[in-house]
Amino acid sequence: MSTSRFAVLQLSGCAGCEVSLLNASEWIDQYRLMYMPLVVSAYDVPDVDILLISGGVRTDQDLHHLRTAVKKAGKVVAVGTCAISGGVANLGDRDEVRDLFLSQSSRRHVPRLLPRCQPVDAVVDIDLYLPGCPPTSELFMAALFDPEGFQASRSVCQECGRLKDKSIRPDKLVGFQQGKVQEGLCLINQGYLCVGSSTRGGCRAPCTRAGHPCVGCRGPSDFFIEKESKEWLGSIQKVFETMTDIPRDEIAQALVSPQFALFLFQFSDYAGGNRPLRHKEKVL
Amino acid sequence: MPTLIFPISRIEGHAQVVIDTHGDEVVSAHFQATEFRGFDYFVQGIPAEQMPVIVPRICGVCSTAHHVCSVKALESLYGVTPPPLARRIRELLLLGQLIQNQATSLFIFTMPDRMGTDSIFEPEVSASASRPGIAVQSLQVRKAGTDLISLAGGQFIHPVKAVVGGVTGGISNQATDEMRTKLNAILPVACELFDHYWQSSLEMAERIGTWGDDQPSHYIASTGKSCMNLDSDTICMLDENGKQVDCFSPAEFQQKLTFIESTYSYSDETLYKGEIMRANSLARINMSLRMGTPLADQYLDRFQTTFGKPAHAIMLFDLSRGIELVYALERAIEILSEPLDGEETSIPYTPRDGEGFGLVEAPRGPLIHHYSVENGLIKSAKFIIPTVHNMQAISRALKVAANRYVGNDQIDLELEKAVGRVVRAFDPCIACATH
C-alpha cells in the first residue's frame, strides 16, 4: 500500500488539536506527515491527500495561508471548534468587548487582525467537519483512516455510563465549581447543567465520566445539526423539564453564558454571522 | 541594510525571527510573536466560575497549568485551602503536564536538530540503523504524561477535574496501580532516550563548536530550593552568580517585574530591575539543590559536575528538560504508591468579589493568573505567562548567534539552524505568550 500524504495547517488556535493528534501513533506507518509547523520544519504545504485545518481565521496571515493551502489538498477537513466556528477567540466578537479587543490591532509589524474571527468555511469549501475541543485521538484516527466506518453512539449521554434516578429532582442549578460529585449518578440529577443528552457522541464522554458536565464541544447530534440552534436549546430545556424542577429561565440564561455559547452555537449563528448549513453526512 | 526573516517551526505557536544586518554588524535580532486572540479582553464579563474551563483554551499544550492556576486564583479570592488529597492529585496533573511537555520538546521539537532532519516523523529517521523506532518511542513517553493527566484531570487537553476547594473525586486503587505499572515500564525507555539525546547533544556541540554562548543571566522560578515544588506560592530570583536575590508572592508581580509592550510582537516582554532574566528548565535546575528522586538526582549530579552551577549555556535548557522528565516520572510513581481514593477531595466555599492570584510552575516557568471579580463576573484578568519573561533573553541570545554567523561579505547558512536551536532551547509557547 502506498503511503498517503497529509498536512496540518495551524491557524489561530491553541494547538490542542495538534497535541491530540500526537497522542496517537497509528498513523506513523501509513501516513507521511508533510507539513505541521508544530513538529515539522517545512515552509509551505506541498501537494497532499488530506489537509487538516485547525484554528480560526483571525489574522490576514491566516487568510493567506488558508487560501494557498487548500489548493494543494485532495480532501479538506476542518478540525476543532475554532476551525468550525472561530472558537474561543470568537468570544472577542461579543458586542461588549469588541472595541477593547480591536484596539490591539494598532500594533505594527505583526499580522493584522481581521475585523472578525471567521470559521474556515467562510473562506474555503470543507469536505469533512471534525468537531471537538479538541477531538479525541480516536476521532482523529477515524478522520484519517475511516470516517464512514466510525462507530459511535448518537449522543454523549449514551456514552457516559452514569445512571439517571427519577426520584431525584433538583430545583436549582449547581455551579460547575461545586467540589463534590457523586459517583455513578447522572449529573443532571445532581443539579449540573449537562448538555450531553443531545451533544454529538464519539468522544466516549471523558468529561462527564470525570465528573464535569458536558458543555457541548462536539456540537449537536445528527438530529439537530441541520437545524437552527434554538431547536437544540429547546431539546435541552425539555430534558431539564422532564428530569428537574429547575426554572426554565435559569437554564436559558446559563445556556447562553460564554462557556456554553462558545460550543452550542458552533454549527449555527453566533455573533450575527450567517453560517452555511453543514450537512450531517459531512460531520464526523 | 539586509533583513533576514526566519519563520520558526517545531515550537508551540506562530513566531519568526527577524535579524537586521549592516555589513558584518548585526544591528538587531528580534523574536516576534505573530498571533493574537485576546483572552485579556474577551474574558471580561464572564462568570468567574467558568474561568477554569475557558482559560485552558489559551493553549492546548499548557492547558493543565492554566486549569490548575485558574482554580488557585479563585481559591485565593474566596479564601479556600484545598485538602491534602486534592493537592496530591493536582500535583499529579502538573507532573503529567511536565512529562508530556519535556518529552515533546526533547524528542519531537529539538531531536531533529541533533539528527540533521526536518522532523522526527521522517520515514528515514524511523528506519535509521542508529536509533530505530525513535518516533514511536518518543510518542509513547509523551503519552505516559497525557495518560497521567487524563487519570487525574478527566481529559488530557483542557482537563476538568480541578475545582475550587479541591478536585471532583479521588482515584481508585486499581487505577493508581495500573498507572504506576505503566510509568514504571516507561521510565527506562525515557532514560534511554534521554541518554541518546545527551550523547547527540555532545556531538552537536562539538560539531558547531558551542553549547550556545551568551552572557550569564538572572533566573526566575517558583519551584524552591530543596526538592522541586510545582505547586508553591512563592517566586524566587537568582542573580547571574546563582545567588538568591529575591522572593515574592504572585500578588507582588506588578511591583517586581517591568512589563514592556513592543510594536514588533503580539507578546509583552519583562525585565527584573532592568535585568534580562530567564525562566524554564534551566532556571529550575540552577535553583534546585536536589531533585529529590534517585535517578533524576544522578542526572543532576552529572549535569552539575560537567557544566557547573549555575550553568548558563543556552542548550543546557534542553538537557535540564531531560532531568525534569526523569524526575516527573519518578515523582509520579511515588505519589501513585499512596492511596488516592480518600473521601476528602474538596471543601465547601462561598464565592465573593475581590482580587485573586494563582501561581503554578508550568513547564515554561512560573505562571500567574490575576483576576478581579465584581458581582461574580470577571472585571479584569491578567495572565502572566512565563515565556514572556524569556522574550528579552531569546532576542539577546539570537543576537549572539547571529554575530557568530554573519560575516563581512557572507552569511554562514548555519545561521538558520542556529536560530532554530536557540529559540527551541527556550521552548517558547506563543499561544500562551500572546493569548
Image (spheres, rainbow, N blue to C red):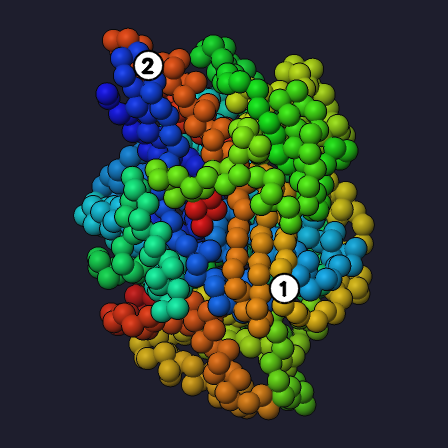
Instruction: State how many labels appear.
Output: 2
Q: Determine the residue located farthest toward the left in the rendered image.
A: A71
Rendered-image quadrant of the N terminus of chain B:
top left
When asked about the image quadrant of residue A40, the answer is: top left
Q: Determine whether B313 is above or below B260 in the image.
A: above
Secondary structure at badge 1 equals: strand
- State which mark lies toward you, 1 or 2: 1
Percent coordinates x, y for residue A155 in the rendering: 47, 74
* Residue found 28% across the figure and 48% down from its top: A112
Spatial CA span between label 1 and label 2: 52 Å
Q: Amino acid at mark 2?
A: Glu
Left or right of A170? Residue B136 is left
Res B192 seen here: no
Residue at position x 70%, y 29% from top? B244
Q: The residue tagged with tag 2: helix, strand or loop?
A: strand
Q: Chain of mark 1?
A: B
Quick one: label 2, few (<14), some, or many (20+) residues within 10 Å? some
Q: Nearer the viewer, residue B273 or B7?
A: B273
Place of residue A131 in the rendered image (x, y in percent of width and height, measured from the top left): 39, 62
The image position of residue B52, as x and y in percent, is 57, 60
Q: Residues within 10 Å of mark 1 (few under 14, many from 20)?
A: some
Amino acid type for the residue under numbered disc 1: Gly
Q: Which residue is mark 1?
A: B354
Residue A160 image position (x, y, % from top left): 57, 71
In the image, B317 versus B46, the foreground residue is B46
Labelled disc at residue B25: 2
Question: In the shown orientation, is residue A250 left or right of residue A45?
Answer: right
